[in-house]
Image (cartoon, rainbow, N blue to C red):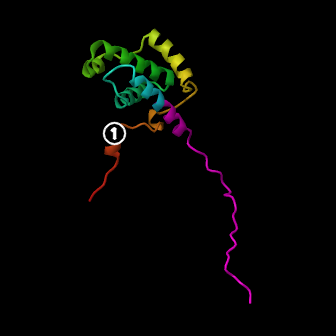
Amino acid sequence: MANNNHIILEITSAEKEVTQDPFINYSLKVKKYLETKATEVKGVGIETLIKVFKSAGRDCSDIKYCAARINNFLEVFSDYKNFKTAVANNFEPSEECLAVAIIECKDHDIDEIEFEDVDQFYLETKDEFKNSIDIEI
């Protein structure tokens, strides 16, 4: 009598290779950059900088411009120490903010990121995340 207590599995590879969305890695890099920037000025958190980044990205789809707007926001915020006053100011970055942003983007390896819509990034604030989940009990 033959013993049939083992199973033979045939394993084949998938015909299609699944490509990962590059914006997953881009988002992680941008988030790390924003976390670094959030430590520069007391009272500014990552959530605020995500909002500033997304606002800048809606105005211009250039990562260096977005970084320059972050620098400009932090500069204005540190002068006023008031979020509402900083937000009320015009955020067009100065040439100085743009020059610093170009260097920072290169240092954080985000200078090559190209995007058409800022919503391509996986960057959400807690409020945006809560609003995106609609659960009825």
Which residue is identified by label 1?
126
Residue drawn 30% across the image and 21% down it: 87
Residue 65 picture location, percent across and down:
47, 20
- Location of residue 89 by image quarter: top left
Helix or strand or loop: what does disc 1 sit on? Answer: helix
Q: Quadrant of the C terminus?
A: bottom left
In the displayed structure, 1 sits above or below 29; it is below
In the displayed structure, 85 sits above or below 135; it is above
- Which residue is at the front of the view, 45 or 52? 45
- Location of residue 122 by image quarter: top left
Residue drawn 37% across the image and 18% down it: 74
The magenta segment: 1-30
Type of residue at label 1? Lys
**Mark 1 neighbour class, 10 Å CA radius: few under 14, some 14 to 19, many 20 or more:** few
In the displayed structure, 68 sits above or below 124; it is above
Check if residue 76 falls in the magenta segment. no
Q: Quadrant of the N terminus?
A: bottom right
Residue drawn 39% across the image and 38% down it: 124
Q: Tell me the chief SS of the magenta region.
A: loop
Residue 12 picture location, percent across and down:
70, 62
